[in-house]
Image: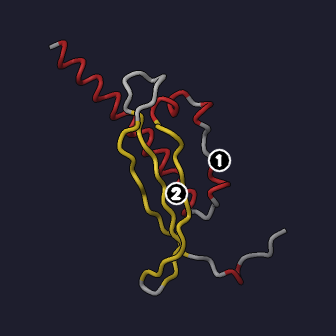
Amino acid sequence: MVSLSSTLMLQEELATRVAITRNFQENMTRLWQLGLSPVQINSLMPAQAQNALLQQAVHGTPALVETGLTTINGVVMETARSTAAVNISRDPRHEVEGASFTLTAYRPRLITALRPPPP
């Protein structure tokens, strides 16, 4: 029973870390889909250094990289990839990289003539 209980606690902790990491990654991706740049997203997202849960859950620094343009059903779309990895270490002070997960996101490309001129 003790062994089973210990295993269940470890699995629950890992599931929590995965959920925190994926939530962080999905929020980065949603902000990009709303039209923000990667620089703006990085300034809005909570810093790992100031958040103990993120420090324990996320391995390294999640990244969102714009990857260019693609055409889907005749519509030009901007694309980006968001990548994050979970910390699978049993000791939260040390990081061990788990499998990384990459999301590919799309957003319609705005017609530049509709954008106001930069200040």
**Disc 1 target residue:** 44
Q: Secondary structure at mark 1?
A: helix
- Residue 46: x %, y % from top left: 60, 40
Numbered marks: total: 2
Left of 35 or right of it: where is 60? left
Image point 63% across, 49% down: which residue? 42
- Residue 80: x %, y % from top left: 51, 64
Left of 42 or right of it: where is 100? left
Image point 47% across, 37% down: which residue? 58
Q: Where 80 falls versus 4 (above or below)?
A: below
Left of 61 or right of it: where is 57? left
Q: Where 24 falls versus 55 (above or below)?
A: below
Image point 69% across, 80% down: which residue? 112
- Residue 11: x %, y % from top left: 28, 29
- How far apart marks 1 and 2 lie (CA) works out to 12 Å
Q: Earlier in the sequence, mark 1 or mark 2?
A: 2
**Disc 2 target residue:** 30
Res. 31 mark: none
Contact? badges 1 and 2 (CB < 8 Å)? no
Quadrant in the picture for the N terminus: top left
Query: Within 10 angstroms of label 1, few (less than 14), some, or many (20 or more) residues?
Result: few
